[in-house]
Image (cartoon, helix red, strand yellow):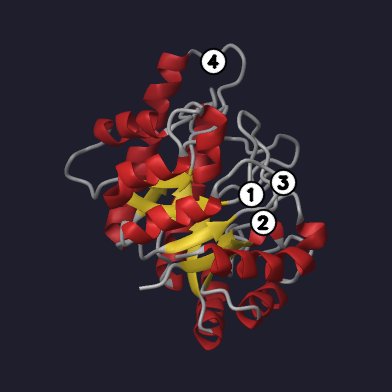
Amino acid sequence: MPLRFAYNTNGLAHHRLDDALRLLADTGYDGVALTLDHHHLDPLAPDAEDAARTLRARLDGLGLAVMVETGARFLLDPRDKHEPTFVTADPAGRARRAEFLERAVDLAAVLGAETVSFWAGVPKPGVDRTAAWDWLVEGVGRVARHAAGRGVPLSFEPEPGMLVEHAGEWERLRDALDPGLPPLRLALDTGHCLVTGSLSPQEAVRRYASQLGTVAVEDMRRGVHEHLAWGEGDMDVPAVLAALDAAGYDRLVTVELSRDSHRAHELVPRTIAYLRASAP
């Protein structure tokens, strides 16, 4: 089965959602990585589930699969990027993050999404990391129980600079959760492997192939956490795609270029052409 490619709507921030979806379908993508945000299916809107049902019909009509991303920058706090998170000191803030992710799970169930992807957050100065770890396990456990009840797979993304930075720390988190819950899958951003240096991107694919919930590819420089277009970094994309193909990976392979919405009209077609040419 050929690899299936999707583009993240956080790289289409200046497009209406329907225009973005038509662009992806017209240029040959298999799906969309939908970052829930105020302008792209606002999860906090009172009619969000109705909007999700309408969106599901639109995706079906365009032949697009979907997975849900939850990394909107200012959705929960307009003054503090990504806050609150699971490692925020304020219990009410942590609860708000959990409620948001439960809402994302509910919308993913309506959409028929492959998975919901999320991350830990960055501990603020002065936050005890042991306490932050306990908060994270508690919060992820809460969301995992909710997701199990809705039949929605969860995928956790290690993120450079956050409490969980690489796949080894994801394993620790996975193992800390209630064993009666469905396994917490790995959301592997292959570019992050170049930043942390813990494993090469293709080695990470091979090691965790059976536990992957979603995979992102983009170019990136070693040691620098900046998502780049093809040819601007050090990523061996053909090697990563070959590893995914060899592993029989059948979920969406997503592209996240969140700082490039201003040139999405150029990068969307260029990206799918590059990926198709680079895939086995």
The answer for how far apart the CA atoms under marks 4 and 1 are is 23 Å
Whichever of labels 4 and 1 marks the residue nearer the N terminus, that label is: 1
Q: Is residue 115 left or right of residue 72?
A: left
Whichever of labels 1 and 3 marks the residue nearer the N terminus, that label is: 1
Coordinates of residue 116 in the picture (x, y in percent): 44, 55
| Residue under the image location 49 percent in, 84 percent down | 60
Pointer 4 residue: 127
Residue contact at pointers 4 and 1, CB within 8 angstroms:
no
Whichever of labels 2 and 3 marks the residue nearer the N terminus, that label is: 2
Q: Nearer the viewer, residue 32 or 247?
A: 247
Pointer 1 residue: 72
For label 1, the SS is loop
Residue 232 - label: 3
Q: Nearer the viewer, mark 2 or mark 4?
A: 2
Q: Nearer the viewer, residue 217 or 8?
A: 217
The answer for how far apart the CA atoms under marks 3 and 4 are is 36 Å
Q: Nearer the viewer, mark 1 or mark 2?
A: 2
Residue contact at pointers 1 and 3, CB within 8 angstroms:
no
Whichever of labels 3 and 4 marks the residue nearer the N terminus, that label is: 4
The answer for how far apart the CA atoms under marks 1 and 2 are is 8 Å
